[in-house]
Image (cartoon, rainbow, N blue to C red):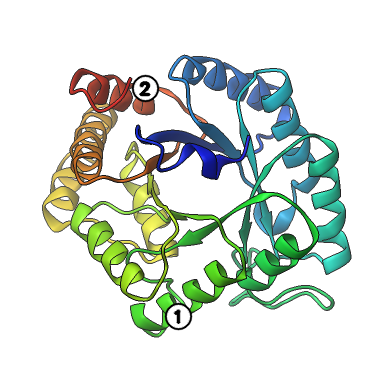
Amino acid sequence: MKIIDALGQGAPAFSFEFFPPKGEAGMTQLFQTLAELRDYRPSYVSVTYGAGGSTRELTVELVRRIKHELGLEAMAHLTCVGATRAELGQVLDSLRAAGIDNVIALRGDPPKGAARFEPTVGGFAHASELVAFTRKNYQFCIAGACYPEAHPEAASLEQDLDALKLKVDAGADFLITQLFFDADAYFSFVEQARARGIDVPIVAGIMPITNVAQIKRFTSMCGASIPSELLAELEQSEDDAEKVREIGVRSAVELCSRLLAGGVPGIHFYTLNRSHATRQILDTLRARGFAT
């Protein structure tokens, strides 16, 4: 099934993101998490690459198992980092052979220790190029990433929207946002995207806060911000892990409720391979009538 067919069809799509784990214990935990979240009938799940594309083969194997063993629709991440066009074509060939219908095409972050992204010789410099290559040669449903508060390397949101328009024009079927914590930022971004002629569904990417130092690190990397009142509350409870999780779940529920009330086509949870916080959020949204 192509994910685009599940978007904009009435009920919002709920989905989850995972990363390839290290070792057998991590794999066992991942499939336990998947089993726990399967009961929530996600529209799809996605599997990331490791840093610099280091888990390329494992990503392909995981999406194959998720689709064919667990019966969940799966989407593979694909990045430009450290790969030539031919190598990326080989990955796409493997995904097609595995019966996968969906990919998310990304530029990718600079490898660890690198100050900035450098294109691989014979590879791609921008996600829009990878989208165009995939669209020209394959029949996948293609997702792309977007940044409600602008990509950290962009000079402005306007410049970032120009780059996003290129990506959509190249063939992206829908977009998933980077994490954010302010519903108004999402709605303002969508309004500006629509004004630029970007008319594909824009799914909200949500990361439940479970660790203060961790979420500060993530937001500094991707250019997202945490509202001052929420940040102050988190910092006051930084040494109380259970309290931080409680605040994180509550804030995510309120954020998702506003987004759903405002007509968001889908919510994509960045789970960090854990299910507890995401299940709590979904249970509360169900109780409020926002999820089934």
The residue closer to the viewer here, 145 or 278, is 145
Camera-near label (1 vs 2) is 1
Residue ID at (16%, 48%):
230
Apparent side of residue 173 relative to residue 150 in the rendered image (left or right): right
Q: Disc 1 versus disc 2: distance between alpha carbons? A: 36 Å
Q: Is residue 240 visible?
A: yes
Q: Earlier in the sequence, mark 1 or mark 2?
A: 1
Residue ID at (19%, 58%):
184
Q: Position of residue 189 (x, y in %)?
A: 29, 65
What amino acid is labelled 1 in the image? Asp
Apparent side of residue 150 relative to residue 249 in the rendered image (left or right): right
Q: Position of residue 124 (x, y in %)?
A: 73, 74
Q: Can you identify the residue that label 2 sits on?
A: 279
> Helix, strand or loop at disc 2?
helix
Q: Position of residue 33 (x, y in %)?
A: 53, 21
> Helix, strand or loop at disc 1?
helix
Spot the residue most to the left.
229
Q: Can you identify the residue that label 1 sits on?
A: 162
Residue ID at (78%, 74%):
120
Residue ID at (35%, 81%):
158
On screen, residue 102 above or below 127: above
Q: Is residue 239 visible?
A: no
